[in-house]
Image (cartoon, rainbow, N blue to C red):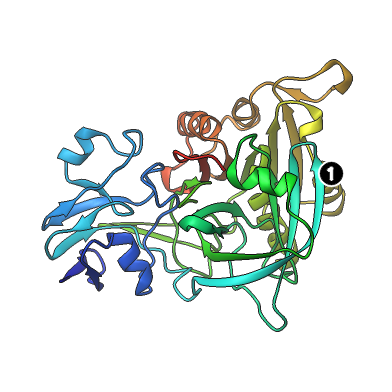
Amino acid sequence: MTFKIRIQSSGREFIAEEKETVLAAALRQGVMLAYSCRNGACGTCKGKLVSGELDYGTYESKAMSEAEKENGHALFCQAKPLSDLVIEAKEIAAAKDIPIRIMPARVVQMEKLADDVMRLSLKLAEGQRLQFLAGQYIDILLSGNLRRSFSLSTSPLSDELLQLHIRHVPGGHFTDHVFGKMKEKDLLRFQGPFGMFFLREDDVQGSTNVGRSQHPASRGISTSMYVTGDRMSRATPEHPAILVAGGTGFAPIKGILEYAFAKGITRPLHLYWGVRAKRDLYLADLPQTWAKEYKNFKFTPVLSATLPEDHWNGRQGWVHEAVAGDHPDLSQHEVYASGPPPMIDALKGVVKKHGLPEDRLYYDSFEFAHSTV
């Protein structure tokens, strides 16, 4: 049995197989709906059911409240059609021509950037290249139908090696293996690219807010037309961009910045990197070098729990407070944020109070599902 699904705003149609989620069916047929976590945790894929019947699936209440559900909302990464549907959904044009592929890769280098952060460098087979957008992520495919998601820290303009920044989660199924048993020359399989976390530019259409789960089914390209229902808004390359990283949330932002520098993007770029102690700034020399090389780039590290040995004279406190303190009026900015959910949630509240338009906040929330990494 199959079901026809029509997106009300654009009129695009696609077919869902029985027991297939709306999002899975859309992606399978090249219809790029906004999404990130794919496990009902972040709310990025939330849209409306205009007509038809759904199995709403399993999801977290923070992603969609009961009131929202009663008001016709659904999470399309979990919802499965029980009849033909008409829906309202955010479509992303920019990623539509990038295929999602399953590919093998060899681990060619393992480098500890900190006691609990490993840089994993992967090389594809000779002649193979992964097409992706700076800021996207891949799923490492494991036995038992498990998968773990990690952001690509590399720019697609320099993709000879794909690099991941992996934080060790003690007891984690995959990260224990990386930090304990993995060796260079090991083979992995991955699927990707995924996600809607990318720098918006004025020459490509498609934009939305995003979140991501770093787990079994997890984790928002250049812009930027955001379309949902009758609403439409355009980002421009003149908007200063504030980039906010928490911990290893630096990985996708590193890729975005390297892409921006290579492309010669000249609009102001200001990176805030929030960590606990100085040792957690595992690649601090890199953004410091960028700040010297590029006049349009600024770097502000922010420590929330300094240690005596840090001898820290820089910014302290929460990274979202640093952003708000430096930018009391965000009405002409874009904000890109990547990191743990508490940081993202705090930032969302602050930037709204300081005038940031809702459709100019782009985030990759490292949501954790119900199993370890």
- Residue 36 position (above or below residue 116): below
Q: How dense is the environment of label 1, judged by Cα within 10 Å: few (below 14), some, or many (20 and up)?
A: some
Residue at horizontal 58 percent and vertical 72 percent from the top: 103
Q: Residue furthest top?
A: 308
Picture coordinates of residue 232 (x, y %)?
35, 58
Q: Nearer the viewer, residue 13 or 9?
A: 13
Quarter of the picture containing the N terminus is bottom left
* Residue indicated by mark 1: 288
Kind of residue at badge 1: Gln
- Residue 76 position (above or below residue 316): below
Residue at horizontal 74 percent and vertical 55 percent from the top: 120
Q: Nearer the viewer, residue 84 or 260?
A: 84
* Quarter of the figure with residue 33: bottom left
Left or right: 322 with respect to 359?
right
* Quarter of the figure with residue 112: top right
- Residue 274 position (above or below residue 97): above
Picture coordinates of residue 15 (x, y %)?
23, 72
Residue 250 visible, this orientation: no
Residue 218 visible, this orientation: yes
Picture coordinates of residue 83 (x, y %)?
11, 62
